[in-house]
């Protein structure tokens, strides 16, 4: 397969709301070694067929089409991306593209201690680790797996090998971990990481979701103020999903308030699944198949034209639409379990969250 002619298309494209195509989440596998209740509440799943999973060369090529149209930030996701064999090879490939200015990885951390050095040596820019609790028993209850100590060891190894800009993502769930949020900020201080609290979202297979479990941005800020006093917003021009805040001692933390305060107006992200389906919104129930034309021998310009026309027609604002349902008291499960079982692409572990 020929490489992408990077730089052949100038400038970024925008959708119907003027949002640029700026960030791509690239899933390398739908498999995961945890079963977090907010993401994978079932024990058994229909996995993507092996023969449909993109090769590293195909992922590299597709990413190049997106960077030709304006993408500068790429985040490698899963499932759990560290389950994909030889992942540092893909990292090195992606960094051959000079238009990839920021290459990050999101992981649950279970395999991170063993792979952090190789990822760093490959040139990976940043790592984000999911850390919902500092309590091993709570971790096991949420994930239905052991391994909390391995996550902490992975975080320590990331720091040791020299990664900068470490982030820790915490899904804040009422009745589960709201009493730990301040402790997590303190833990972040100790390892030099910025903690980001994520409101519990009703996406994909979050079949146990309810509004009562959402610990909101307003509640998080109240809790933090009770401990630290004054909390100031960080004023910055950014399309990143987190709203960032600073404590009196200069410590920063973030909140991703997708459920109560959607940020659809500035969303520049889209997602490619491990088998080449392109989704324009985290809440989208239909995607665009890019694997088929790629494997059928479509020209680079044909595939870029598809991406361009689809993005320019993009009207997605899924989080805002879900929020509007609250006015009518009908914000319930997004997708019923039968449909989830029929189409694995609808699950968050297949499209990278």
Image: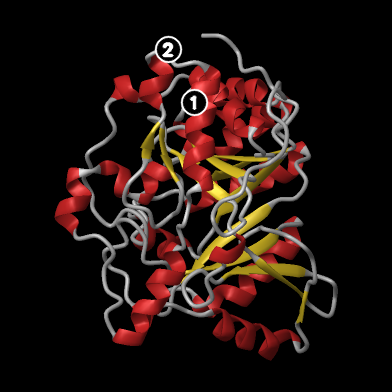
- Does the image show residue 33? no
State the image coordinates of residue 329 (x, y, percent, origin top left).
Answer: 29, 85
Picture quadrant where residue 185 is located? bottom right
- Callout 2 secondary element: loop
Q: Residues within 10 Å of mark 1 (few under 14, many from 20)?
A: some
Rendered view: 330 above or below 63: below
Q: Is residue 119 above or below residue 341?
A: above
Numbered mark located on residue 297 in the image: 2
Q: Tell me the distance, in whole angstroms, between the alpha carbons under discs 2 and 1.
A: 10 Å
Residue 140 seen anywhere in this rendered image of the structure: yes
Of the numbered discs in the image, which one, if any, rests on residue 186? none
Q: Which residue is located at x 51 percent, y 80 percent?
A: 216
Q: Residue furthest right?
A: 249
Residue 228 shown left or right of residue 152 in the figure: right
Q: Is residue 149 left or right of residue 277?
A: right
Viewer-proximal residue among 337 and 139: 337
């Amino acid at each position: 397969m020929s490489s992408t002619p990077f730089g052949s298309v100038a400038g970024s494209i925008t959708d119907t709301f003027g949002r640029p195509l700026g960030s791509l989440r690239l899933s390398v596998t739908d498999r995961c070694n945890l079963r977090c209740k907010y993401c994978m509440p079932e024990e058994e799943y229909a996995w993507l067929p092996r023969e449909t999973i993109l090769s590293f060369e195909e992922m590299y090529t597709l990413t190049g089409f997106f960077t030709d149209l304006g993408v500068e930030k790429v985040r490698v996701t899963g499932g759990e991306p560290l389950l994909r064999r030889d992942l540092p090879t893909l990292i090195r490939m992606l960094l051959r593209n000079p238009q990839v200015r920021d290459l990050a990885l999101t992981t649950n951390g279970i395999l991170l201690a063993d792979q952090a050095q190789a990822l760093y040596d490959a040139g990976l820019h940043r790592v984000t680790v999911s850390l919902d609790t500092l309590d091993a028993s709570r971790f096991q209850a949420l994930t239905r797996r052991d391994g909390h100590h391995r996550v902490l060891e992975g975080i320590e190894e990331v720091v040791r090998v020299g990664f900068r800009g470490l982030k820790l993502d915490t899904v804040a769930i009422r009745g589960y971990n709201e009493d730990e949020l301040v402790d997590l900020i303190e833990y972040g201080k100790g390892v030099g990481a910025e903690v980001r609290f994520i409101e519990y979202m009703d996406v994909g297979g979050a079949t146990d979701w309810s509004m009562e479990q959402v610990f909101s941005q307003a509640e998080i800020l109240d809790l933090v103020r009770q401990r630290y006093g004054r909390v100031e917003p960080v004023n910055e021009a950014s399309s990143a999903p987190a709203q960032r805040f600073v404590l009196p001692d200069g410590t920063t933390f973030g909140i991703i308030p997708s459920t109560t305060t959607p940020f659809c107006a500035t969303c520049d992200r889209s997602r490619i699944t491990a088998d080449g389906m392109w989704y324009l919104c985290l809440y989208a129930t239909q995607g665009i198949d890019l694997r088929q034309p790629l494997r059928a021998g479509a020209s680079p310009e044909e595939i870029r034209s598809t991406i361009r026309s689809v993005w320019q027609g993009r009207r997605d604002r899924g989080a805002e639409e879900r929020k509007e349902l609250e006015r009518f008291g009908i914000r319930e499960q997004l997708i019923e379990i039968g449909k989830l079982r029929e189409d694995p692409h609808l699950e968050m572990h297949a499209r990278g969250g």
